[in-house]
Image (tube, rainbow, N blue to C red):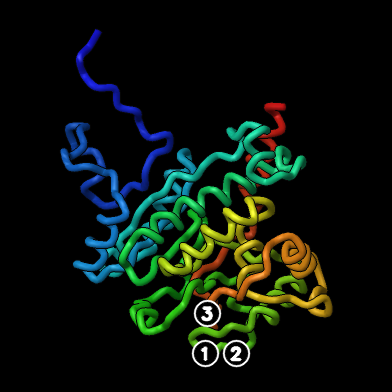
Amino acid sequence: MSSKPFCRRPRFPLPRKYDSLSRPTSAGKSPPQSRRIFANQISERSKSMEKTPAFIISLPEDGASFAATASQLSNTTYEIYRLPALPGSALPDCVCMKLTRDPHSKFNKGALGCMLSHIRVWEQIAKSNAPYALVLEDDAKNIALQNTSWLRELNFDLIFCNDRMATNTGDKSLAVNNNFIGALKAVDTHGHSVGADAYFLSPKGAAKLIERFAEDLYFGHVDVRMAAYCVNVCKDDAIGNVTAEINQIHAIIKSRDPLDAYITGEPLFSHPSRESRRIYQDIAGKARL
């Protein structure tokens, strides 16, 4: 028997830093430095270079989508990390039930996998010393993102900067606002959902989301759950599917003060009008039944 100590490998891959050095060399070999980036490394690198951490959530097989999204960000402003998404279809039924207490969750594994993927990012942000980070899904399209160093002066938990929320707030003269009721009503009117494809998150905001999801469990869709923690929606405000769903969420979760959350007046990212990949994960999960 070997005398070497047993070392358990990580269950899931850690976020990978994306830069020219992480690509294979012409000889087919990667440079010797580690590609695993831990929270303390994120903090130090971003602080020393005055760069904002940018996490891009991408399924392992979607390398092209990740590369396309990463190429839209300035490497002088953002330190880019790829976080492999968790395929919801691979989750056992019993795990879905344990995490959600919802017997129907085994038919919606794509939504649960998406939620857990975002929570993995939040854990990295909560441990970092960077003032905030940008979180993107790998199909987000940059339409107006510039240097956002001015966000350092704003004490916030969460800022939605996607088009589904930002274009519906009314007052575009403000850099950010907290008109969530107006945004959610407009989302309902247009038949969209909130979307978690693009948002800024501070360490304290990440810690709050982690705590609240852990206490309230992991049911529903991550974007609507995030919005539910940002606003108190009364029954008169529920005019469609999203606002009605937020009311249902509020009937289940603990009562708390809303997050210090905002919406950008102008959208910084847009989302393509295509069928959600969560649905494909749901279908793949059902095929395993």
Determine whether, in the image, residue 274 is placed left or right of residue 24: right
Mark toward the start of the polypeptide (2 vs 3): 2
Mark toward the start of the polypeptide (3 vs 1): 1
Q: Amino acid at mark 3?
A: Thr
Marks 2/3: CA distance?
A: 10 Å
Question: What kind of element bears circle 3?
Answer: strand
Residue 270 is situated, as x and y percent measured from the top left of the image, at: 55, 67
Residue 263 is situated, as x and y percent measured from the top left of the image, at: 55, 78
Point out which mark residue 174 bears.
1
Q: Which corner quadrant holds the C terminus?
A: top right
Res. 98 image quadrant:
top right
Q: Which corner quadrant holds the N terminus?
A: top left
Q: Residue furthest bottom?
A: 173
Badge 1 local density, few (<14 within 10 Å), some, or many (20+)? few
Point out which mark residue 171 bears.
2
Q: Does the CB distance between marks 3 and 1 fall below 8 Å?
A: no
Marks 3/1: CA distance?
A: 8 Å
Residue 259 is situated, as x and y percent measured from the top left of the image, at: 56, 74
Per the image, the residue denoted by label 3 is: 264
Residue positioned 63% across, 44% down in the render: 99
Badge 2 local density, few (<14 within 10 Å), some, or many (20+)? some
- Reply above or below: 28 against 244: above
Point out which mark residue 203 bears.
none
